[in-house]
Amino acid sequence: MAKVIVVTSGKGGVGKTTTAAAIGTGLAQRGHRTVVVDFDVGLRNLDLIMGVERRVVFDFVNVINDGIRLNQALIKDKRTEGLYILPTSQTRDKEALTREGVERVMEELKQEFDYIVCDSPAGIEKGAQMALWYADEAIVVTNPEVASVRDSDRMLGIVNSKSRRAELGLEPIRAHLLLTRYDLDRVERGDMLRLEDVVEILAIPVLGVIPNDPLVLHCSNLGLPVILEPKSKAGQAYRDAVARLLGEDVPLRFTKPERRGFFDWFMRRSA
Amino acid sequence: MSLLDFFRRNRGRRSAETAKQRLQVLVALDRSGGGGADFLPLLQKELLDVIRKYVEVDERRVKIELEQGKDLSVLEVNVEFPTARLRARAVA
């Protein structure tokens, strides 16, 4: 049975698209047929992060409104077997999505794929609600920072009340916390919220903690999902998160300080 | 940076703790329905109508403040008016 996962947050700029690209790629790497769908109508970026921007001809909105077939709009990823991208429109607005249209496309995707990863726009209004409408699970991307945590909490309220599952009285969407841009040094100095603090406030299970990693920007520059960069700690943490999403019990990494020698300590202090 | 600072750099900067406390208050308020301060303009108008029955009040001399806490919130209403007007009404 195909599973629909929404990557959402409320606040913008916390790493939703990076996460959607990484998790989608990771699921495909593990042998599951996966499609990543861009719901951010008007601010199309998923194709850019996944490096397929020059191959976009038709999009999600064309499929809903203009009689274009799904197969014409789906882009097959050349790097990862079994991975597809459904880009969105750069010129239309969020009004171009309707529940009926989204439901029709989702049902069709469910016939073809094991996982449908929906990349939500920022905000808590129509666009974001459309992205989570059909979801079975939600990945709530959060930075350890007050505005992001607060917005994630608001978004969780919407996930619990404004989804198809909520309205039909089905089992609620399973929400997971993905804490990104986690800077262990600042956490240890008491200058950044700890994982445990965020979990205490949001009260949802942890899917993963993604360390702050310069290679994330490097990969987005290249149009490469960070999970494909073996040297990247963020990439490794995303691989762990994918394993947990598949039900495996993987311990958290990058959440405790590594044992360091005196020299390290000295260098960091004087930095 | 003095040598003492070098060893003390970590002291007194625990902003994460403040962040957590602020968030706990804020999230509790959000969950209870958006902070609940939407009624303040109407409250101000109705309070003024009542007070005006007894005293002449200049609208610019009214200050309403709400301080929201985790368990307790304080609503403070300050109405200023010249003492003479109060006397005038009382006599009339």
Image (cartoon, coloured by chain):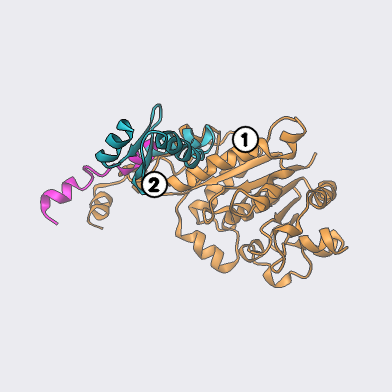
- Circles 2 and 1 in contact, beta carbons < 8 Å: no
Tell me if mark 1 has few (under 14), some (14-19) or many (20+) residues whose alpha carbon lies within 10 angstroms of its own. Answer: few
Q: Which residue is mark 2?
A: B59
Q: Is residue A196 above or below residue A267?
A: above
Element assignment for label 2: helix
The answer to whether residue B10 is left or right of residue A108 is left
Residue A143 locus on image (x, y percent): 47, 48
Amino acid type at mark 2: Glu
What tint does the image give chain B? cyan
Residue in the image at 36% along x and 46% along y: B58
Mark linked to residue A248: 1
Query: Is the magenta region chiefly helix, strand or loop?
Result: helix
The answer to whether residue A153 is left or right of residue A186 is right
In the picture, residue B24 is in which quadrant?
top left
What tint does the image give chain A? orange
Q: Is residue A71 above or below residue A157?
A: below
Element assignment for label 1: loop
Chain of the residue displaying label 2:
B
Residue A271 seen: yes
**In the image, which residues are magenta?**
B1-21
